[in-house]
Image (spheres, rainbow, N blue to C red):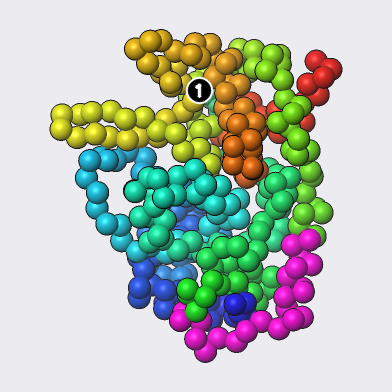
């Protein structure tokens, strides 16, 4: 269903949801947008968070020998690129990993759909913000006007709120169309056939990469992890395909060189995942570039002319 709310009703919606769910949202901490527990709707600040919200589903470091039923959480302020990341990861993880699956089933993400392109993101190269597919989506299309797409599973929260008119819906659809027109496009489609195994890019990047792993940790679609036994506990923690120990076994490391590990990261995103799951393992949030201390740019990997190196 599609509803039309004003700012006061948005606060009422928050109150209703907070009676059933623990509430989290994006807040401003000394100029940084970050996810945190919130106790009131006023605390919410909308904007792309510094770190992606994947921690709500994949623990940064957790004992996987102990399963605890997760609390029901409502996460306000998830941006379109990050929400899309969950739907991409679902294809790989949902139903297979009991921790991820239980958290996914107990978390409602309240997506604040982007209406203006952000400074560095390039999500429209991957289709841009999506409507209709997700749990609860909020579009603040004019000062005090919010259009809300909500799955029927959440309709009890919307009792008494008015449904959106055809005019309001078409206004929002036009806004979303303009969003995709405004943002510079990078030709992602077909990159799985253009990208080259022996490209000079991998060696060039290997000369400057400091192997910090920030590109993986800040990515809403990177889900690789490592397992370590500590006494009688087994911890799973986020891993990075750029680090030297990644995929190392007693038989050796199939990717000894840094260049091969950098190539692996882009091949996983643009070739292997596309061929196995039908889409790219990237939403165009650009955090990997924004957080890279040596400015290795994912857009360059997409735009590069591999035939004329
Ligand atoms: S732009 Fe970078 S950080 Fe963002 S989804 Fe794509 S690979 Fe991940
Ligand atoms: S963020 Fe940059 S420097 Fe750090 S591992 Fe990734 S590519 Fe290398």
Q: Check disc 1 and report its element: helix, strand or loop.
A: loop
Task: Give the left or right position of residue 292, taking residue 119 as reference.
Answer: left
Residue 214 visible from this viewpoint: yes
Relative to residue 181, is residue 43 depicted above or below?
below
Question: Is residue 165 found inside the magenta-colored segment of the image?
Answer: yes
Is residue 48 visible to us here?
Answer: no
Vertical arrangement, residue 285 with respect to residue 267, above or below: below
Alpha-carbon neighbours of circle 1 within 10 Å: few (<14), some, or many (≥20)?
Answer: many
Q: Which residue is found at the position 71% from the left and 57% from the top?
A: 116
Main SS of the magenta segment? helix
What is the x, y in percent for residue 96? 40, 45
What count of labels does the image hold? 1
Ligand 2 sits in which quadrant?
A: top right
Q: Mark 1 points at which residue?
A: 242
Against 213, residue 252 (above or below) is above
Seen as rendered, the residue at the extreme left is 232
Residue 164 lies within the magenta run: yes
Quarter placement of the N terminus = bottom right
Mark 1, ligand 2, within 8 Å: the answer is: yes
- Give whichever of 143, 191 is nearer the camera: 191
Q: Which residue is drawn at 54% across and 19% down?
A: 261
């Amino acid at each position: 269903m599609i509803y039309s709310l004003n700012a006061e009703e948005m606060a009422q919606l928050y109150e209703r949801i907070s009676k059933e769910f623990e509430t989290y949202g994006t807040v401003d901490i000394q100029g940084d947008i970050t996810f945190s527990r919130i106790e009131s709707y006023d605390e919410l600040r909308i904007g792309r968070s510094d770190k992606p919200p994947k921690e709500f589903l994949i623990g940064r470091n957790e004992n996987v020998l102990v399963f605890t039923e997760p609390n029901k959480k409502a996460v306000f302020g998830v941006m379109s690129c990050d929400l899309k990341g969950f739907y991409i990861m679902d294809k790989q993880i949902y139903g297979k990993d009991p921790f991820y699956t239980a958290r996914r089933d107990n978390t409602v993400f309240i997506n604040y759909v982007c209406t203006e392109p952000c400074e560095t993101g390039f999500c429209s190269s991957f289709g841009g913000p999506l409507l209709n597919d997700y749990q609860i989506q909020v579009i603040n299309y004019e000062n005090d006007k919010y259009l809300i797409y909500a799955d029927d599973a959440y309709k009890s929260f919307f009792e008494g709120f008015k449904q959106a008119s055809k005019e309001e819906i078409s206004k929002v659809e036009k806004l979303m169309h303009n969003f995709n027109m405004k943002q510079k496009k990078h030709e992602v489609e077909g990159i799985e056939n253009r990208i080259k195994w022996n490209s000079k890019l991998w060696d060039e990047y290997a000369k400057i990469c400091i192997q910090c792993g920030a590109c993986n940790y800040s990515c809403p679609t990177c889900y690789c992890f490592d397992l370590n036994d500590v006494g009688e506990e087994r911890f799973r923690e986020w891993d990075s395909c750029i680090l030297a120990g990644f995929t190392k076994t007693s038989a050796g490391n199939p990717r000894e060189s840094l260049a091969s590990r950098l190539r692996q990261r882009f091949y996983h995103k643009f070739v292997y995942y596309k061929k196995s799951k039908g889409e790219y393992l990237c939403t165009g949030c650009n955090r990997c570039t924004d957080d890279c201390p040596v400015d290795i740019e994912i857009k360059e990997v997409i735009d590069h002319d591999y035939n004329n190196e």
